[in-house]
Image: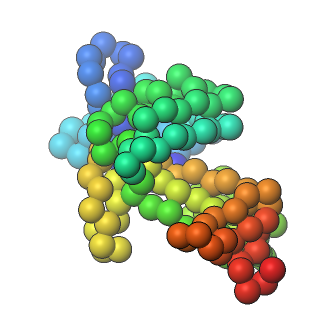
Amino acid sequence: MKVSDIIAFTADWGIMGRVIPRVVEIRDGRFYTKGDNAPSRDKGHRTAKDIEGVRLKFEKGEVVDYSAEKEEKTLKGIIEIDDGFRRLGEMAIGTNRGIKRHTLNMLFDEKIGDTIHCALGRAYKDCNGVNESAVHVDMIKSMTEGEVTAGDEIIYAKGKYFYEM
C-alpha cells in the first residue's frame, strides 16, 4: 500500500456494502482512507494483511478455485469484489537479481530476480490491458523450484531463463 492507492473493502463501522476509497495517509502500519468525493477522511483505519501460500486454479483465464495458508478469508473477500478480479491484470518475470530481500514496497519487490509476479484485477490500459476491476492486487512467487512454459517449451526454470540453463 502507498498513498494514492485505491482499495476496496467491506466497511465495518456502520456502512453496508463495498467501500472503494483512496489511501491518504499511512502511519504505524495503519492506512487511512478518503473517498474522492468525500469532504473529510473516513472514520477508522485499515491494517494491511499479508496473504501467504496462495494457490489459484484457472480455467479459461478465470480463477475458479483458490486457497491460502494465511488470511484465506481476506483473499476470499477480495476475490469476490467483482468478476474482473478473477482474471489476471498483470504478469511478469522478476529480473533484478541485485535486490536481495523483500522491502514490502511492491514496486521494488515485484522485480526481485528469480521470481514471478502477477496481479489479479485491473489491468493497466497504457500497457494495452483490458481487464476491468475495482482493484489490482500483486502477488510474488519464488521460482527457484518452478518453471514457466510457452507452448511446449520451458522458457524459465529454477529462476533462470532458457538461455542461462
Farthest residue to the left: give it. Answer: 37
Residue 23 shows in this picture: no
Farthest residue to the top: give it. Answer: 14
* Residue under the image location 53 percent in, 57 percent down: 118
Q: Is residue 26 left or right of residue 23?
A: right
Front position in the image: 39 or 141: 141
Q: Position of residue 10 (x, y in %)?
A: 36, 24
Front position in the image: 14 or 63: 63
Front position in the image: 150 or 156: 150
* Residue under the image location 34 percent in, 54 percent down: 122
Q: Quadrant of the C terminus?
A: bottom right
Residue 162 appears in which quarter of the rendering? bottom right
> Compared to 121, does 64 lie above or below?
above
Q: Is residue 146 left or right of residue 131?
A: right
Farthest residue to the front: give it. Answer: 152
* Residue under the image location 29 percent in, 28 percent down: 18
Farthest residue to the bottom: give it. Answer: 163
Q: Position of residue 121 (x, y in %)?
A: 38, 49
Give the colour scheme of this rendering.
Answer: rainbow
> Compared to 7, does 92 lie above or below?
below
Residue 112 shows in this picture: yes
How many discs mark residues in the rendered view? 0
Q: Position of residue 72 (x, y in %)?
A: 57, 26
Q: Position of residue 150 (x, y in %)?
A: 55, 71
